[in-house]
Image (cartoon, rainbow, N blue to C red):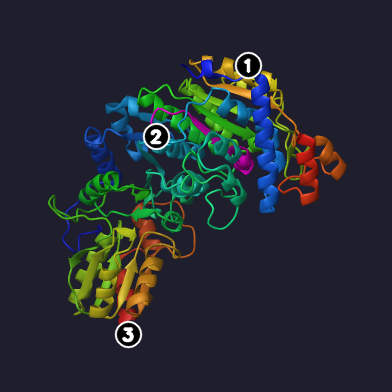
Amino acid sequence: MSLEDQRPTIEELEDKARVLRRHIIEMTTEAGSGHPTSSLSATEVVTAIYFGGFLNYNAAEPDWTERDRFIMSKGHAVPALYAAMAEAGYFPVEDLATLRKLGSPLEGHPNVRRLAGIEASTGSLGQGLSIGLGQALGCRIDGLDSRVFVVMGDGEMGEGQVWEAIATAHKYQVGNLTAIVDQNGYQQTGATSDVLDLTPFAPKIESFGWHVQTINGNDMSEVVSALETAVDITDRPTAIVAETQKGFGILPVLEEAGDMNFHGQALPAEVAEKALAHLG
Amino acid sequence: MAIGDKSGLSPGGATRDAFGKALETLGERFPEVVVVDGDVGNSTRTEAFATAFPDRAFNVGIAEANMVSVAGGLASCGKTPVVASFAAFLLCNAYDQIRMSVTFPAQNVKLVGSHSGISIGEDGPSQMGIEDVALACSLPGMTVIVPCDEISTGKATEEMLQREGPVYLRLGRPAVPRIYEDDSEFVIGRANQLRDGDDLTIIANGLMVAVALDAAAELSDQGISARVLDMHTVKPIDEPAVAAAARETQAIVVAEEHSANGGLGSAVAIAVSRTTPVPIAYVNTGDCYAESGDPDGLLEKYGLTSGRIVEAARSVKAN
């Protein structure tokens, strides 16, 4: 049975996304730090890739040679990835409560040396796409049809290295690489449009010879449909510009708390409680 | 008088040429080796490998950051990427990529920096890697090798490919004297004693090994007996060899084609102070950038001569 045949319904994936969101809020509030809102914007994308039948993996054998690879290039959004990995069986869900604590492999940013199933150590922005490109080329040399998914932030697109990788992926016609830009519109000090506006991303990336789709990245059916299109393209690299909202899923709670960005901080316990209640 | 004349060394080729030749030769034996080039393959000499194994060579253009991270990705798929560029561009331009995509995840990437030091000559300071050894040594888990001649470079290339984990191999542009024979031993992390002596030890690497042997010949004429160690591996440094030199000769001169801070001098100073504190003198390019000019003139002007080693030796003995 192919991965595609096992694809859950959109409703099932939405339910899974809700579970991931609860984990994200609980683990970061427990840790007392982290980037919950940056994780929440990417939750549909991460959920669809891990549970929508797009990523070929084996949690019991994380280094399985023929696996697909997922890289969280915006490493600060790793709570979304940890939540997915826990749900996928890489480690017990209870371990999420150890996020950022001394001795825990669930570090503040992903570390390949600490946690099996992490494909790239990230946290210095701009390198994940290049690493993913190297992995896509490595799989190609070995005749594997493994696909590499890389999730980047829109603020991260300010790193010149991202565009070096985009150009090089085109040069080598890397057909097994899919980049997702989580365009949540905010970065550390404010709106991405104010800090360094690189939008619109689609025509820029397209001009490098990539196949690009722009979608509502918090709409599960759009995410699934875009991923379906992307994985069918094997003659060139593909990008999905996922227009999202930072903190999606708990926006009214953030509004009430008076900070729609909430960058780089855990929700205080009382806000987290409201957020969890809002998620249901 | 050319480098190596005083000590009777025969002329040899450039270490970058020896590396390029060795890499091409070893390509068959090491099928996992791939080359990632930043469009300087004809300078770093990876070109021969790329011609012989076109499917295993990637020229990613003038984009060192991407070059290094792509290599990290290839390594995570079980490849052994050899990334070659000018020492200055590789270490300085892509330092964070080496940190995040290579050493932090402990990927098996081999970094090769050619055109190190001031002996590249006329192209000038922007092209001169004089900080690269310090930068490479600062990265946890990095092995740092600075070979001195063609033969040891060929062996270093082979050992580098056999060794698991990140390695930085530093190469030079000009032809350098031949120090070793084909059957000489080269082991990463083990210094080679090229000359024995009782009065002091000159510890050198790269181009400065031949200069050190010249200095030892001069010192011998002056009645001073100098031991010479080729410390081709800066990290991990051969601490037992340094300690023995300190204990047995009671004075050390360190000679390297690198800035004053963070290179071989610093590594030797740490090893000496940890084991057998003795006076140390340093011969290096100091705390400055050099300039354009002919290589011999630059080495003279910036103090990388046997005369300067002799002066340093006499001063350190007088302490």
Query: Does residue B175 show up magenta in the picture?
Result: no
In the rendered structure, find residue B272 and report the number of the disc placed on it: none
Q: Nearer the viewer, residue A115 or B82?
A: A115
**Chain for numbered disc 3:** B
- Badge 3 density bin: few <14, some 14–19, many ≥20, Cα 10 Å: few
- Badge 2 density bin: few <14, some 14–19, many ≥20, Cα 10 Å: many
Is residue B281 visible from the viewing direction of this image? yes
Say which residue label 2 marks.
B77
Task: Indicate the position of residue B180 as horizontal and vertical percent values.
Answer: 17, 55
Is tag 2's residue or tag 3's residue first in the polypeptide sequence?
A: 2
Residue B72 picture quarter: top left
Task: Indicate the position of residue A34 as horizontal and vertical percent values.
Answer: 67, 48
Q: In the rendered structure, are the residues bearing label 2 and label 1 in contact, judged by CB atoms less than 8 Å apart?
A: no
Say which residue label 3 marks.
B318
Task: Indicate the position of residue A124 as horizontal and vertical percent values.
Answer: 58, 45
* Viewer-nearest of discs 2 and 1: 1
Q: Give, as a three-letter code, the residue at label 3.
A: Ala
* Viewer-nearest of discs 1 and 3: 1
Instruction: Measure how far apart labels 2 and 3 are at the Cα level.
Output: 56 Å
**Chain for numbered disc 2:** B
Say which residue label 1 marks.
A225
Q: Residue at x 58, y 15 (%)?
A: A229
Picture layout, residue B310 above or below residue A84: below
Dot 1: element: helix
Q: Give, as a three-letter code, the residue at label 2.
A: Cys
Q: Nearer the viewer, residue B113 or A33?
A: A33
